Structures are given as structure tokens and as C-alpha cells.
Image: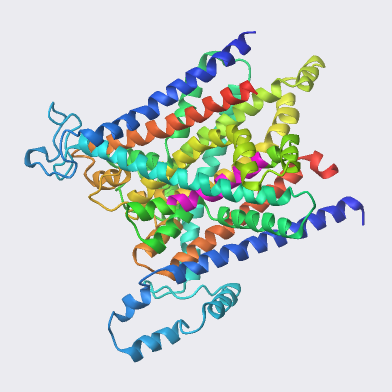
Amino acid sequence: MHHSQESAHLPPLTLALGIILAGIPLAMGLISLLYTPFEPNLIIANAVSAPITPTHPLGGDYLGRDTLSRLMTGARITITMATMAITTATITAFALSATSVAALNTPTPSRTGQLTHKTITFLTNTLMGIPSLLLALAVVSILGGGIANTTIAITIMLVPGLTRVMQAALIQVYAEDYIKVAKTWGVSNINIALKHALPNAAPSIIVAIPIYMSAAILVEAGLSYLGLGVAPPTPSWGIMLNQSIPHINAQPMAAIAPATMIIFTILGLNLISDGLNQKLRGKK
Amino acid sequence: MSTPTIRIITKLVKNTLDALLLLLGVSVVVFSLLYLTPGNALLIQVGVGSDRALTESYQALFSLNTSPVIQYFEWLQGLLRGNFGVSYVYHAPVFTIVLHALGVTAAIASVAMIIAVGVSLPLGLYLGGSGSQVLRAPLSGIITLGVAVPQFLWGILLLYLFGNVFSAFVPGVYAPLSSILPMAMAGSSGNNAIPALAYLLAPALALALPAIAILSRYTYNSVRELNAQPFMLALQCRGIGGWQLLRRHTLRNLLVGYTSFSGILLIDLLAGSVLVEYIFNIPGLGNTLVTGIHQRDTLLVQGAVLYVAFLVVVINKITDGLYYILNPKLRRA
């Protein structure tokens, strides 16, 4: 009895906590569109390694830039990059997985269909043979750094994993009768994928997205920390870590602040995924 | 030969062929790195706008004057003989450089994996067991937090703690395992042991901590699911409990999934070591890769990525094999 009550209450709590945690950096990023205490790259003479003061609530970094302003702008840049990457990757992965699953489920077994399915699966497996951070590194080594190239690298890194998740979900959906009925009615493949398969596979896809979003944020931070992602002085969280670690004794807050933001975001997204998983599964 | 033996052999052959095909695919991806990279190391070496004859002689030296397809097959042929080319930066064979770096990474990754398994298995079993209501909530809270803190943030924190707070080592200096072990043994009575071990322990811990959290959570959930099953109750009713129940039933059921999960984590650990090695300035595979990218040493990057891909495929196949061995259901099916 007690156990079932506990799990009935769990989803909203996990979800709420996740939304609050991930909401903090999101809110900071949104506010930074309208207002930051200082220009994020402005060097202020008396803010060099400044301690926490009312003017600089998180102090200043080794060059004398306001940490809070950089943190807010960094939130905007990191979250925008991750969102763009996850959106592009999700659409690409859906197109790939729907094509590969639909190719298998033709009314009469076809050679081309088998081949399409096998090719897409092989490509996915091949790219998954390279760990995601290394795949992103390899792409960055070709394209070079910067916001746009790093976003492309993260997108490419996300596609194979998402494709696999969606393939698994779509294979189940395509085996359902309503898909077969829609086919006999002559509904086109694209309409079947978008109007029938997508809504029914949505729960599995929605649960996976926060997890891949957190992977995107982690890899952005990692690449920028290695000096291969976003180029300084652009304030992304990874760049802030990269630049503040050598001066950690003089001004620890400049490193603690972006690290905390990363942890909040990852923890929040993990909790959101857990909560959604329980909620969507519970409803089924 | 009996049918099970034939089945195992067929499976083995099929798996090996699968792995080889996958590696071939990865090799094409990795080879295309060279082709897609603008401004390659050759130009850096020769200098932009330098003598045409010099450029051509360099091109011939690295056989860059033929078609990409021919170059791919030449490169592949070289790979099979262990010839990964010569690093533009280090002027040494990529194979040797990468092999050496791999040794360093492997040492840290193995220590990390031993710590991860050693801590997560008892912790997960304890949390999943019955008599731990008080500690369950705080420990699962810590575990959830541990999953969210990535390896490289642990790395930064540990570097700061070991280097600045405990003064156990000089940050950014690397001591190879071959020098740590004698120091640790000789100094086990003196003051040298702790600093010497810190060089290895700090990066290994950075890699192990998230793995501990993930594996503990997995163990904890599996044990709870397992304990809810009727056969566990039936066994307890028959008077089987304690150590015997744990060893013969809980562990045997748990280890099937745990092993394949550890395989995935080991791969994650190898990838994560790129960042951790950079933080601790360890000359492992990850640092070699980052140096290669910074210096546009494409052959070195190719070699390092290919090595990791090879390891990933091998680890995956070993995990698959272990899964098959540990799960009798699969053998009979």
C-alpha cells in the first residue's frame, strides 16, 4: 500500500524539481536577452578578481569581467546551442528512423526496403562505434571551433543515438493495426509517419530528449573547456571554466558559478526525464 | 559435434564478421577526416606559397598525390600491418605514440573501473536490501547528484582538492605508473606513498565517481525488482537466505545485466578520460588526441580515434560474449 502511494506521488515531485533546477539557467538566459548587470566582455579595472560585493554579486574574473553577467550570457549561448542541436538532430533522426522502419513495413517484402533499413542501421551503428565526445571532437577537428561549428558537431553527435531510440519506438508502432489500416486506405508514407507514427511514438521520444539535451550541454562545455569549441571571449560555461581554472585560488567563484550551472542543468534535465518517464508510463 | 557447440561457433564467427564490418565502416569515417580537413598539416609543414617542387615532393612522401580511393586502400593496407603513418608533429610512427598513450589511459581507466565496481556493487546491494531504510533516502540523493556531476567537473574539483588543499601533488605534473609504484612501495612506511598514489588516484576517482553513482543506481533498482519476484520469496520460504541467497541467486541474476552495463560504462570512461587527462595533464590517449587536433596532426587524430573505435568494438563484443555466458537462458534458446 505504502509503496504504491509513494510512486503515485513521485512523478510530479521529480518533474517539478527538475523543472525548477533546469529553469534557473533558462530564466537567466532569457533575462540576459533584456538585461545583464554589465556588458559580459567589459573589463572593469576594480573588478579584477573582485570578491562578492553588491555591485558584483558573483565577483569578477581574472580580467575584471563581471561573473554574473558572463554567467547569464553564457546560459543563453549554451542553451541556444543545445536547443538548436537537439531540434535539428531530432528532426534528422526522426526522418532517418521513420524511413528505415517504413521501408521494412511495406505491404510486400521488398529488396530495396530491406537494403534501406540495413544501410541506415549500419550507418547508425558505425557512428555509435565512436564514443560521442570523440565523434564531436572529430567533427570539430574538421570544421574548426566557433558557435556554429560546435553546434553542428553536437548535432552530428546526437543523431545516431536518437535514431536508435526512435527506431526502437517506431518498430513497435509500425506493428500496430492502425498503421496497417491507414496503409490500406492509401495514406502516404509521410502522412503515416507524421500523423500516425509520430504521436504514438511521442512518449518514448519525449523521455529521451532531456537526456540527449544534457549530453549536448555537457559536450559543449567539454569542447569549449578543451579550447576546441566556442572561441573566447564569448562567454559559454565551458569557456568560463577554461579561463577561470588557472586562477581558481584568486577567484574561486568564477569557476564555481559555471560548474554549478552545469550541474543544475544536467540534474534538472535528468529529473525531468525521470518524471516524464514515470508519468507517461503510468498513464499507459 | 553437438548442436550447442556448433551454435556457439556460428555465433562467434557471425559476431566477428559483424565487428570487422563495423570497423571497416569506422575506418572510412576516420579516413574521411583527412579529406575534409581544410588547411592540413602538410601546408603548415611546407609553408603556404613555398616552392612547388618542394610541395610535390612532400605530397609524394606522404602519398597525397593519388586519388582518395587509392589512398584509402593504401592506408587500410598500412593499418593492417600496424602502420598508421608518421605523425607530422612528433616525427614518430603514430602506432607507437598511440600505443604508448593507450597504456597510460588503460592504467587510469582500469583503476577507475575497479573502484567503480568495488564500491557500486556492495552499495547497490545494501540499498536494494531490506535493512537500510534510514540511509536509503540520503544515499539515493547523493547518487542522483553523482549521476549529474560530469567526470570533468569531478576532475577539476579533485585537482583543486588534492593539489591545493591537501597539497598531495603538484597540479599539472604527471608521474607515470612505473615511477609511482616503486615510490608507493618504498614509501609505504614514509610520507611518499600518499602523494605518489594521488597522481593515479585523483584522475581515476574523477572517472570513477559518476560511474559509481550510475552503477549503484542500476544495482539498487535491479535488486529491488529481483526481490519483488516470487521465486525469491519461495527460496526464502524454503529457508535459503543470507549469504547463500545472495551468492547463488541475487548475484547470479544481477550480474547478467550488470556486466553489459559495466561494458557501456567502460566505454564512457574511455571517452571521459579525454577531458580528465587534459585537466591533470596526463599524456594518455585523450591528451594525444587533443594535441593532435590543436596541431592539425590529422594522422595522429585518425590513429587515436581508430584505436578508441577498435577498443569500443572489442569491449562491446566481449560484453556480448559475457552476457551469453552468464545468461543460461540464451544458451538454451
Residue A176 against residue B275 in the figure, above or below: above
Residue at image point 65% right, 26% down: B223
Judged left or right of residue B201, residue A171 is: right
Instruction: State which region is magenta.
Output: A154-170
Residue B205 in view (yes/no): yes
Would residue B220 be counted in the magenta stretch?
A: no
Residue A229 in view (yes/no): no
Judged left or right of residue A60, residue A109 is: right
In the rendered view of the protein, which quadrant contains the N terminus of chain A? top right
From the image, give the main secondary structure of the stretch colored magenta.
helix
Judged left or right of residue B69, residue A111 is: right
In the rendered view of the protein, which quadrant contains the C terminus of chain A? top right
| Residue nearer the viewer, B290 or B277 | B290
Residue at image point 76% right, 40% down: B327
Please, which residue is most extreme toward the bottom here?
B53
Residue at image point 39% right, 74% down: B88
Name the image quarter holding residue B161: top left
